[in-house]
Amino acid sequence: MQQIIVIGSDHAAFELKTFLTKQLQTSGFIVEDVGTYNQESVDYPQFAQAVAENIANARGGKKGILLCGTGVGMSIMANKVKGVRAALIHDLFSAKLTREHNDSNVLCMGARVIAASMAWEIVNVWLSTPFIGGKHHNRIAFITNYEQKNL
């Protein structure tokens, strides 16, 4: 079964989104692109919301990628959605650990912070790294319980 990746960006990261979408499709992933579809100025929160809600409603069947100038705004908005664990990543070590330890389901990156080739390496590490569970299950459960009670 092919994995589905839901991707979204603002205008600042449109070119990076286009590049990563092509790379993902060439690698056999199904990509659902929620926009933006050009470089005209847009407000990033609507795209973060669209990806995050899609991932939260999929209950583990998909992963998301969000891109903006720094990745910060996307990660802030995405983490407002119950069930989303969005991680702002700009290096390979963090990409690996956020999957192993945090079971992150949305990857956020900044097009003005890293080169497209590094972004693709990060995506590859992030998508190929499994959640290791163990003591980390308790930590994820704590986060989930908090969400259930407070969000």
Image (cartoon, rainbow, N blue to C red):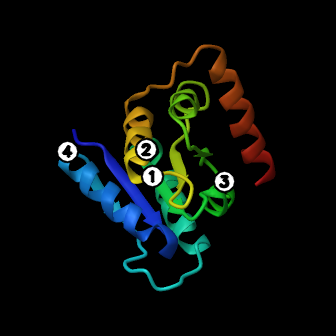
For residue 140, which quarter of the picture? top right
- Sequence-wise, the earlier of marks 2 and 3 is 3
Cα distance between the residues tagged 2 and 4: 20 Å
Instruction: Tell me residue 76's x, y (percent).
Output: 69, 58
At 61% from the left and 71% from the top, the residue drawn is 45
At label 2, which amino acid type do we have? Met
Name the element at disc 2. helix
The disc placed on residue 118 is: 2
- CB within 8 Å, label 2 to label 1: yes
- Sequence-wise, the earlier of marks 2 and 4 is 4
- Sequence-wise, the earlier of marks 1 and 3 is 3
Cα distance between the residues tagged 2 and 1: 5 Å
Cα distance between the residues tagged 4 and 3: 28 Å
The disc placed on residue 79 is: 3
Query: Which of 11/76 is in front?
Result: 11
Query: Which of 65/118 is in front?
Result: 118
Cα distance between the residues tagged 2 and 3: 24 Å
Query: Outermost residue toward the right?
Result: 150
Query: In this rendering, which labeled residue sits more in front, label 2 or label 4?
Result: 2
At label 1, which amino acid type do we have? Ala
Cα distance between the residues tagged 1 and 4: 22 Å
- Sequence-wise, the earlier of marks 4 and 3 is 4
Give the residue pinned by disc 4.
28
Q: Is residue 10 visible?
A: no
The disc placed on residue 115 is: 1
